[in-house]
Amino acid sequence: MITTPALFDMIAALVGTPSISSVSPKLDQGNLKVIDLLAGWLDAAGFEVEVMPLLGMPAKANLVATLGRGPGGLVLSGHTDTVAFDAGRWTYNPFELTRTDNRLYGLGTSDMKAFLALAIEALRDIRPADLREPVILLATADEETSMAGAKALVERGIPQARHALIGEPTGLRPVRMHKGILMEAIHLQGRSGHSSDPALGNSALEAMHTVIGALMAWRAQLQDEYRNPLFAVPVPTLNLGHIHGGDNPNRICADCELHIDLRPLPGMELEELRAGIHTCVNRSLQDTGIRVTFESLFDGIPAMETATDAEIIRVTEKLTGHAAGSVAFGTEAPYLQQLGMNTVVLGPGDIAQAHQPDEYLALDRLNPTIGLLRDLIKSVCT
């Protein structure tokens, strides 16, 4: 039987331990102190605990904690990192759990440190002898930036289980599909010259106009070919997020850069899409004399889909009373699926509270989450 700190004490300790991951080195932090908290609690509670350092990232690690033995099993997964916060815009200290207005305020309450505490609480009365299949608590690093933690799990081939639940904020509604994401930079190099005579240069900015037109036509083709009415936005999207070119009105623009964001539906492969972007751009620039280079700003997260008849989907639909749906944000689910697990995304927070000041988790979500996880464990592991 698990003897861990009280639920609110666990949530407070997790929230109070900063573990921001960011693409900015000035903001990026490790997560080892969070991992150490979890490892201490779970080791004392009888779990078999492995702390898995990330290669080349000495301040970051995953945790795999197993209760029970045997094949199969259920993974309860959450990431230990948070995004950065807007200093001065919080009403409450983001690193101090504040209980007021029937809410728990703090960085990571909704997305998603509190879920890890709730998963431990759900296991409090479970004994290893009660389990015919193991329960694995998985805590990962760097979900908010690089997915380095999830990728390291795939490389190691751990953990192994039949089912996985990721406690991302879904309002306690099961999710079996989400879109993927990739981000690409397109840099065009032309030739500068005096603006009084276009023949003196080769405008990268005008060439980017051509590139944008070609990308918009390619986007329209994708949206004609791929459609899934189960998503709120039923087609893949391509967003022109950033552009910069030139330095002065009286100079022909020599360099121009465009950053794009592509959100594919399940069934669309990231590398094929990246190759499609390159082909589209290169074709539009034929015979222009403009040089193009590409940079992957983010390798990407694959889209995710779990079959409607998967046991984890059927059970969570029955337990929640809601049909499994879809979301637009990405998760670590595709990586757990690569490890052979049927995966559902289901957690107590709301995505509307994530990544913004005064993030909170409603108090009335706590007991239903604990009850749901206990019932799920009993359904598939005992």
Image (tube, rainbow, N blue to C red):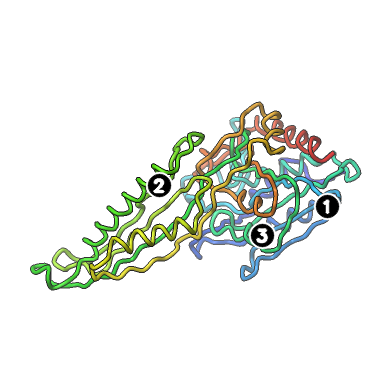
Task: Work out whether mark 3 precedes mark 1 in sequence or the reverse, and give the earlier one.
Answer: 1
Count of picture labels: 3
Q: What secondary structure is marked by label 1?
A: loop
Q: Amino acid at mark 1?
A: Phe
Q: Nearer the viewer, mark 1 or mark 2?
A: 2
The Cα–Cα distance between marks 1 and 2, rounded to whole angstroms, is 48 Å
Can you tell which quarter of the image residue 310 is in? top right
Mark 1 or 2 closer to N-term? 1
Q: Position of residue 352 (x, y in %)?
A: 51, 38
Mark 3 is on which residue type? Val
Compared with residue 28, is residue 9 higher up or lower down, i.e. above or below?
A: above
Q: Horizontally, is 1 left or right of 273 in the view?
A: right
Instruction: State the quadrant of the C terminus.
Output: top right
**In the rendered image, which residue does mark 3 sit on?**
154
The image shows residue 122, relative to residue 278, as above or below, that is: above
Q: Label 1, on which residue?
A: 47
The 10 Å Cα crowd at callout 2, few under 14, some 14 to 19, many 20 or more, is: some
N-terminal-most mark, 2 or 3: 3
Residue, disc 2: 222
Hey, which residue is sitting farthest right in the picture? Answer: 129
Residue 265: where, in percent of width, then height? 49, 45
* Residue 378 percent coordinates (x, y): 81, 36
Q: Quadrant of the N terminus?
A: top right
Left/right of residue 338 with respect to residue 376 in the rendered view: left
Q: Residue 109 lies in what quarter of the image?
A: top right
